[in-house]
Image: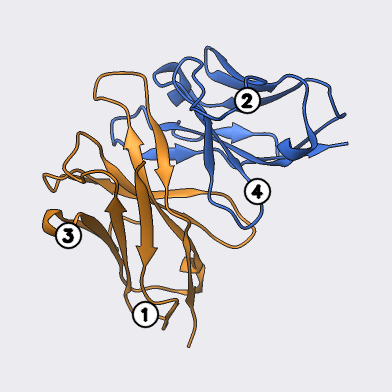
Chain colours: A blue, B orange
Amino acid sequence: SSELTQDPAVSVALGQTVRITCQGDSLRSYYASWYQQKPGQAPVLVIYGKNNRPSGIPDRFSGSSSGNTASLTITGAQAEDEADYYCNSRDSSGNHRGVFGGGTKLTVL
Amino acid sequence: QVQLQESGPGLVKPSGTLSLTCAVSGGSISSSNWWSWVRQPPGKGLEWIGEIYHSGSTNYNPSLKSRVTISVDKSKNQFSLKLSSVTAADTAVYYCARDQGAAGTRVYYFDYWGQGTLVTVSS
């Protein structure tokens, strides 16, 4: 399959830990990358590769992967983390297509 | 710091052709990167459209392949998107982005994005 599946919405209490997951067969061949998108803004890369953060991304963001599931974990969620989160990888069926998950709306309570 | 800037008409008539350009600054389009177009319909998720390498090699989303052409102009350090036979379903914010991830590795991601440009398909 070339699709990536995410839960549409997740909520977390301020300061608590939340995990956002992404499932798809392509994740057995490619690491997921994760993007944060706030209203009216372009996506921002937060995690790539095995578990790498671009410069400027807080260390409360981390990534992991097992089998066909990738996870983005926010440890100690802050109000400013409220956003849409998208996972991404390449289609592993050979057509080199980029694939995005449907996105997860994170609400910080 | 690499910067990408989309430009093009914000309104296209149905059955017409959408044309956008992404200007790259702070880096060379001839670097060892692919360059992508991604779109987002209002209130919906991200959709990868396709990508190009400075050699002119391309990969396209099979769902759009029959209507999409991506080209590169190395002299202007920019790349372009053409989407033909547009309908209201093509109304979206269009982003250009830089790919990272060498062939044969498990790594693939977009590290730089343009701010996006809204294209509306309407008569």
Q: Nearer the viewer, mark 4 or mark 2?
A: 2
Q: Which residue is mark 1?
A: B15
Which residue is at 32% across, 75% downward? B17
Whether residue B14 is visible: yes
Chain letter for the residue marked with disc 4 in the picture: A
Q: Nearer the viewer, mark 3 or mark 1?
A: 3
Distance Cα–Cα, label 4 vs label 2: 16 Å
Q: Which residue is mark 3?
A: B76
Question: What amino acid type is highlighted by mark number 2?
Answer: Pro
Note whether B108 is above or below B90 in the view shown. Answer: above
Under circle 2, the secondary element is loop
Question: What amino acid type is highlighted by mark number 3?
Answer: Lys
Is B67 on the left-hand or right-hand side of A52? left
Chain letter for the residue marked with disc 2 in the picture: A
Q: Which residue is mark 4?
A: A38
From the top left corner, tell me how far across and down residue B116 is, in percent. 47, 59
Which residue is at 80% across, 37% downward? A79
Question: What amino acid type is highlighted by mark number 1?
Answer: Ser
Under circle 1, the secondary element is loop
**What label does residue A58 carry, if any?**
2
